[in-house]
Amino acid sequence: MNKYHQLTREERYCITGLQSAGLSQAAIARHMGRAASTISRELRRNRTTHDGRYRAEKAQKYASARRRRARRRSWYSALQWQTVEALLRKKWSPEQISAVLRQKAVCRMSHETIYRYILRDKREGGTLYKHMRIMTKVCRKRYAGKDSRGVLAGKRHISERGAAIEQRQQLGHWEGDTVIG
């Protein structure tokens, strides 16, 4: 048997179609080249709550949500986290800690990982955040909207300046007016 891999969205739609055509779970499994237990588990886990039927779109949402909630083990040992905590208590910044850990070949841990660890500790009632010299605001992801960083609101382009400015008759129309000599 092939190595296990999760069902794709297309396979879920295929299951819905074959089920509505009246095929049994075993027949669907044979048609898709999957184990019957895989199809059975998929149908049992991902049926809708209000009527108990299997719908591919809902099944995909349920599976994605489960994957997001899945606990993943930490890449770092308890000893490595103790080292990080000890350095944080000495008022070291996450950037400094990350650089030292990398330099001493202890582990390769990014400063963002350390910030996430501190914030998780704070949510759980810990006090690591109190040892930070500066705790920046929690970053937000900018998925939607236009990126406005570095853009001044209401600023006109230089080509839109008036004709009087082009003649440079008044104080302030020269670029060098504000330069101290």
Image: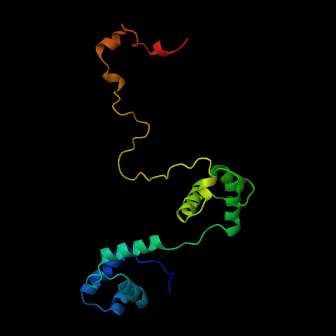
* Viewer-nearest residue: 59 or 82: 82
The residue drawn where x is 36% and y is 78% is: 11
Q: Residue furthest right?
A: 104
Residue 22's image quarter?
bottom left
Residue 132: give x, y in percent of width and height: 62, 51
> Is residue 141 visible in this depiction of the protein?
yes
Q: Is residue 147 above or below residue 113?
A: above
> Is residue 102 visible in this depiction of the protein?
no
Residue 20: give x, y in percent of width and height: 24, 85
* Viewer-nearest residue: 43 or 62: 62
* Quarter occupied by the C terminus: top right
Query: What's the coloring here?
Result: rainbow
Q: Is residue 153 above or below residue 55?
A: above
Count of numbered badges drawn on the protein: 0
* Viewer-nearest residue: 130 or 42: 130
Residue 171: give x, y in percent of width and height: 40, 9
The residue drawn where x is 33% and y is 31% is: 154
Residue 71: give x, y in percent of width and height: 52, 73
154 lies left or right of 34: left
Residue 158's image quarter?
top left
